[in-house]
Amino acid sequence: KKWSVVTTCRTTPLLGVMHFTTIDYVIFALLLVASMGIGLYYALSGGRQRTTQEFLLADRSMSCLPVSLSLIATFQSAVAIVGVPAEIYTHGTQYWFIGCAYILGLLIPAHVFIPVFYRLHLTSAYQYLELRFSKPVRICGTLTFIFQTVIYMGVCVYTPALALNAVTGFDLWGAVLATGLVCTLYTTLGGLKAVIWTDVFQTIVMFAGQLAVIVVGVQQTGGLAEVWRKVWEGNRISGIDLNPDPTERYTFWTLGVGGIFLMLSLYGVNQAQVQRYLSSKTEREAIMSCYMVFPSLQVALALSCVMGLVMFMVLYFVMDMLQDLPGLSGLFIACVFSAALSTISSAFNSLATVTLEDLIKPHCSSMTEARATLLSKGLACSYGLMCLAMAYLTHLMSDSVLQAAFKIFGMVGGPLLGIFCLGMFFPWANSTGALAGLGSGLVMAFWVGIGSIVTRTSGGPAAVSHFNCTAVQLSENITTAIGTALNSTAVQPMGLQRFYSLSFMWYSALSSFTVVITGLIVSFLTGRGELLIITIEDAIRSTWAHHTHSSGLCSLVETTSKSNKTFCNKNKY
Ligand SMILES: O=C(O)CCCC[C@@H]1SC[C@@H]2NC(=O)N[C@@H]21
Ligand code: NA
């Protein structure tokens, strides 16, 4: 049976177009209507989104279950739903080892990052950078985050539309508009409460859709034993790969260790996740929500990987197999769009929060609560429209969507992780060092990232990703033929070429280390006089009245930083 591999197909679907039956459209429409309904409910209930505390932080009243599902939904977009099975198909099950990174990738956020952010009672994560370093560091951090998220949300709104278009012929830009507008509406109307509760609903749809496709897929392939035999014969199960070569795309090291830095940049310091921790009613609830992410994230990973095994190429197989089961393809597409909506809505809301909190409020502190809330709604709406423009940009530069998402996180999220670590773990780092560190981290990340795009290598020749973004119909033998050709021509790159072929899974680690090392060196060179000395107590007393006892925070920061000599005994930080 011919397998067709979709990397990025632009316009015409390749296989016979499987038309959506009406029930499929109904299910897809129900998803959008339900999401809108939740948005309207939170626009008209509670405080009716009249304060920024409610619109941006859900009144800091959330419990750990909805927060944990929302934490997962925020970074489980259509990219993972469609992209991970494609990676499993093209590179085997090595990717599954990223699950090992979830252990430290969630424990460190729970016990290091959450307490610091929560006890400082922040709204934006970047306020921490001003408290620890200076306002310029905060502004640079905010702008870096905005840059990362705007690009990422473009990928997230484009991917599901591309998938739908490739498989059902559904109009690409119609799907982009439908997703973008519905998402902008319910995020602008219902604020963080709506975003979190739609995330909960969409996560359930996401899991249901993946499970349904897998169950039917296994059934149609003749049962689990048959699937296992086919998968084993196709030697799709790759054992643990301990190859230390950093240019190897997926190994236990790039996934299990490099993946930790990726997780820390997302679940530790990314504004979208920090906002969810801050919306929790107590610090303990926030920590619990982080713990509850672990099992669900492992299930999500398992579902994506199993789908990659059972379906090979998810989309075609899905439509091929499900077309005689009306409603299931609609459920699967609803699953893909649930993944997209729950990620994009988090992006809009977190962008509005940091823009208001970090870029606007410091310059007009006299702004009334009503105006601030109205402004944050306007910001959420304008970021929504900007997302449509970014979808078009993604259309122009797409190759493997999962790789694109990981590169964005590595190139931009990595340096952000670096300055937060510089601030929290190195008390002698100063703001000059932080700025120099952030700059060098971004330069390093973009050097390797752009270099890999230009020379088309990052993590070894991808089996089937075609840069000229056409969808290629490959039969099994052609795939292996291309595979061997690539391997034979792929001479071991040397020097700079080898640097460009660094696996994108190492980008987060490389860029965050660059920030810390440069930040420390520049801090030492620029002396310590310039250290912006504020005590945590001052920061909290002057900015926020009610608060847990700062000595508690102080002792925490002491343990975090290990070197307590410059810490609390001088009561300086
Ligand atoms: O799905 C996306 O939009 C981005 C790809 C996944 C991001 C990372 S990978 C490790 C962690 N597990 C997830 O499900 N998401 C994050
Ligand atoms: Na999502």
Image (cartoon, helix red, strand yellow):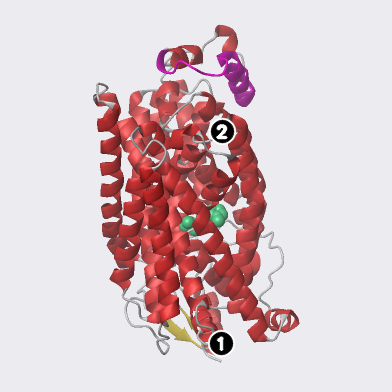
From the image, tell me which residue sits under label 2. 114
Give whichever of discs 1 and 2 has the lower sequence position: 2
Magenta residues, as a range? 542-563
Q: Position of residue 96 (x, y in %)?
A: 64, 62
Q: Which residue is mark 1?
A: 476
Q: Is residue 470 above or below residue 301?
A: below
Q: Is residue 55 magenta?
A: no
Left or right: 463, with 390 as reference point: right
Secondary structure under the numbered disc 1 in the rendered image: helix
Q: What x and y, as percent, mark residue 488?
A: 54, 77
Q: Find numbered disc 2 in the image and state the secondary structure of the residue it sits on.
A: helix
Foreground mark, 1 or 2, reads 2
Q: Quadrant of residue 391?
A: bottom left
Instruction: Please tell me which residue lies in front, 227 or 86.
Output: 227
Q: Nearer the viewer, residue 222 or 79?
A: 222
Mark 1 neighbour class, 10 Å CA radius: few under 14, some 14 to 19, many 20 or more: few
